[in-house]
Amino acid sequence: MKLDELMTRTKDSLEAKRVYAEPYEKDGITVIAAATIAGGSGGGTGRDDKGQEGEGGGFGLNAKPTGAYVITDGQVRWVPAVDLNRLVATAGAVAIAALFVALRIVRAKASQ
């Protein structure tokens, strides 16, 4: 893939149409899902000792659900997406930190 093609594809992938889904309507309720996207690309050209030229590049894109706009009776509200795995991991990390702090306090009081 040529570098100019790579840059064009990167730009096309990071447009607003990738962030917001097509509106979905049912029973008078409209939902527009939204995502956070991040991407990047890189590339380069070079020439070896024999004068041969080459170029290369790469592209990466990451997307995750953020939430959705819900429209009911002309009122819009934002409903955030909940990443249950991240929530459990964060709660676990906080619990472990609290245990370590509690253990240090108990040891400090015992040594006095």
Image (tube, grey):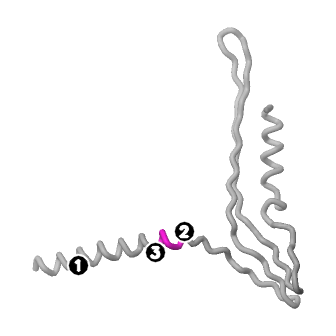
Q: What residue type is labelled 2?
A: Asn
Of the image marks 2 and 1, the number of the one nearer the N terminus: 2
Numbered label tally: 3
Q: Which residue is pictured at 69% across the width and 18% down the height? A: 47
Q: Which residue is pictured at 69% across the width and 59% down the height? A: 63
Q: Answer few, some or many: residues within 10 Å of disc 2's Cα (few below 14, many 20 plus, some between 14 and 19).
A: few
The residue carrying mark 2 is 85
Of the image marks 3 and 2, the number of the one nearer the N terminus: 2
Q: What residue type is labelled 3?
A: Ala
Q: How many angstroms separate mark 3 from mark 2 (CA)?
A: 10 Å
The residue carrying mark 1 is 105
Q: Marks 3 and 1: which is nearer the front? A: 3
The residue carrying mark 3 is 91
Q: Is residue 95 above or below residue 5?
A: below
Q: Is residue 3 left or right of residue 90?
A: right
Q: Answer few, some or many: residues within 10 Å of disc 1's Cα (few below 14, many 20 plus, some between 14 and 19).
A: few
Residue numbers of the magenta segment? 85-90
Q: What residue type is labelled 1?
A: Ile
Q: Answer few, some or many: residues within 10 Å of disc 3's Cα (few below 14, many 20 plus, some between 14 and 19).
A: few
Q: Which residue is pictured at 82% across the width and 36% down the height? A: 4
| Residue sitting farthest toward the bottom | 73
SS at badge 3:
helix
Q: Marks 2 and 1: which is nearer the front? A: 2
Q: In this view, does 91 lie to the left or right of 3?
A: left
In the rendered image, residue 57 lying in the magenta stretch gets the answer no
Q: Which residue is pictured at 85% across the width and 80% down the height? A: 30
SS at badge 2:
helix
Which sits in the foreground, 28 or 14? Answer: 28
In the rendered image, residue 88 lying in the magenta stretch gets the answer yes
- In the image, residue 79 lies at what x, y percent? 71, 80
